[in-house]
Image: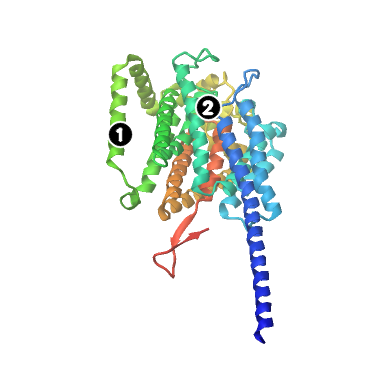
């Protein structure tokens, strides 16, 4: 009997502890659910933007393509950023007082862009950018925001796969529309400029740059998931490759080749131990290649287009080509502008404004007279555009960001296994491919937004390293 009150007390304490633990679990579950809500919102917005931005254009506007895409990005990027921002303010997403080095590079780039706009030769122009291009301060800050959004939300393989599938669907539609243009079945635009398709992106080189970015991502979907989805991804890759070829974009060809080489190089060291190539996939790939060759040889229109693509690719080394000569002129002027304005440049997107001042001084009389007929919107080289518009320090910050992100992505691929490794390889291919294609073209909204999004995702790839206390275990390295 003396133990009766003690047992009753212990029973009450046990029930109280169980109720407290149950409440804690419910509270933790509620917090986790509310904490995950912002991420679901952000990923949902990213998926919507991946579907809408590449496809949208406006027939009622003289700037049918860029203006519509700019409006969508102005809508979607802030909506996506609202999720991580509210999560930080509510304490559900931890805020790093000391940002990582890639984030420091982004902050430095954005700060230099603001300063370059303030001291621009035409601040109002630098704020929004050249018409039909829109690469001013507003867009540059939007790219930095897109990086931060991806940094926070696209942090694992399931999220990246969803984003890749949205891009695969959009790319299939873009490619199919481009093929309709080549067949002269376009219900909207009746004439192709120099016989080159442009689909919903508005310009052949822009279309090619889009496929350079998305094809590596779609390609990895063909080796992940259920068989039906793999087949659909493979079909999207075939359409995308055909459309890329018909753009006749030499920069696009080089970019895709560089991306594929980078993917092969980073995965090669671990192929034997981590990647299984099933014979049926090898046979299927060989059959597809043979069927494609037979179709190209047997169907005269397809054969003619294949010859056009090969001739265009072979002209890459032809320095007498008028387009290559014009590029060299634009680069020469860009270099002089960069050396004359090394710190903050002339202001974002002001190349077209300052080009006439340098044209006659830099180019020969013959080339200057030829280029006088044009108003070049940029040096047709993104790196020169950054250095001439924002200054050499901004270019250094930009290149440092890319270098650090690629190092992170390579480490993740080499030190992880499973789906995250596969999506990491895709991001490496897309980033490297875009780096090469950017050397021959003007920055544009869809590709730049996707590129900065991929940079943010690659910067957040997990890295698994062996535990020091358990050789068989692993831990995640931030």
- Relative height, residue 196 to residue 37 (above, below): above
Question: What crowding class fits label 1: few (fewer than 14 Cα within 10 Å), some (14-19), or many (20 or more)?
Answer: few
Judged from the image, the secondary structure of the residue bearing numbered disc 2 is loop
Residue at the spot of label 2: 363
- Front position in the image: 79 or 114: 79
In three-dimensional space, the C-alpha distance between marks 2 and 1, rounded to whole angstroms, equals 53 Å
Give the percent coordinates (x, y) of residue 289: 30, 29
* Apparent side of residue 25 relative to residue 162 in the rendered image (left or right): right
> Viewed as shown, does residue 235 lie left or right of 188?
left
Q: Residue at x 68, y 32 (%)?
A: 128
Residue at left offset 66%, top offset 86%: 1
- Between 141 and 120, which is closer to the camera in this rendering? 141
Q: Say above or below: 276 vs 127.
A: below
Observer able to see residue 176: yes
Lateral position of residue 244 relative to residue 457, left or right: left
Residue at image coords 66%, 37%: 137
Indicate the quadrant where residue 466 lies: bottom left
Q: Which residue is mark 1?
A: 284
Which mark is on residue 89? none
In this rendering, the answer to whether 19 lies above or below 390 is below
Give the secondary structure at mark 1. helix
User: Which is more foreground, mark 2 or mark 1?
Assistant: 1
**Percent position (x, y) of residue 371?**
54, 22
Residue 13, located in which quarter of the rendered image? bottom right
Residue at horizontal 28 percent and vertical 28 percent from the top: 290
Look at the picture and state if 284 lies above or below 467: above
Label 2 or label 1, whichever comes before in sequence order? 1
């Amino acid at each position: 009997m003396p133990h009766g009150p003690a047992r009753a007390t212990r029973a009450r304490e046990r029930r109280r502890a169980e109720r407290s633990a149950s409440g804690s679990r419910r509270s933790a579950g509620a917090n986790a659910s509310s904490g995950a809500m912002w991420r679901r919102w952000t990923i949902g917005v990213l998926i919507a933007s991946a579907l809408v931005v590449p496809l949208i254009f406006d027939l009622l506007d003289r700037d049918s393509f860029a203006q519509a895409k700019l409006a969508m990005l102005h809508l979607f990027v802030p909506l996506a950023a609202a999720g991580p921002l509210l999560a930080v303010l509510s304490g559900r997403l931890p805020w790093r007082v000391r940002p990582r080095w890639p984030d420091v590079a982004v902050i430095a780039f954005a700060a230099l862009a603001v300063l370059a706009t303030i001291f621009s030769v035409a601040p109002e122009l630098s704020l929004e950018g050249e018409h039909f291009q829109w690469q001013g301060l507003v867009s540059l800050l939007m790219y930095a925001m897109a990086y931060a959004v991806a940094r926070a939300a696209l942090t694992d393989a399931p999220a990246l796969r969803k984003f890749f599938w949205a891009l695969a669907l959009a790319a299939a539609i873009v490619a199919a529309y481009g093929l309709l243009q080549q067949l002269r079945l376009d219900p909207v635009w009746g004439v192709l400029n120099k016989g080159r398709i442009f689909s919903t992106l508005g310009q052949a080189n822009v279309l090619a740059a889009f496929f350079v970015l998305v094809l590596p991502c779609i390609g990895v979907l063909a080796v992940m998931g259920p068989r039906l989805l793999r087949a659909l991804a493979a079909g999207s890759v075939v359409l995308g490759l055909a459309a890329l070829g018909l753009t006749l974009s030499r920069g696009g060809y080089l970019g895709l080749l560089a991306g594929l080489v980078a993917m092969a190089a980073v995965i090669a060291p671990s192929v034997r131990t981590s990647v299984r190539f099933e014979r049926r996939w090898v046979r299927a790939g060989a059959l597809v290649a043979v069927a494609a060759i037979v179709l190209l040889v047997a169907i005269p229109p397809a054969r003619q287009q294949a010859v056009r693509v090969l001739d265009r690719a072979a002209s890459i080394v032809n320095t007498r080509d008028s387009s290559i000569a014009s590029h060299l002129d634009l680069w020469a002027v860009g270099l002089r502008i960069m050396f004359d304005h090394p710190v903050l440049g002339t202001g974002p997107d002001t190349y077209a404004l300052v080009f006439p001042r340098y044209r006659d001084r830099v180019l020969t009389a013959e080339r200057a007279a030829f280029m006088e007929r044009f108003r070049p919107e940029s040096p047709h080289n993104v790196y020169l555009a950054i250095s001439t518009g924002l200054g050499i320090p901004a270019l250094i910050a930009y290149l440092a960001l890319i270098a650090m992100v690629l190092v992170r992505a390579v480490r993740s691929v080499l030190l992880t296994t499973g789906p995250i490794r596969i999506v990491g390889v895709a991001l490496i291919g897309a980033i490297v491919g875009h780096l090469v294609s950017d050397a021959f073209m003007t920055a544009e909204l869809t590709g730049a937004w996707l590129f900065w999004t991929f940079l943010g995702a690659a910067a957040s790839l997990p890295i698994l390293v062996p535990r020091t206390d358990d050789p068989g275990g692993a831990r995640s390295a931030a």
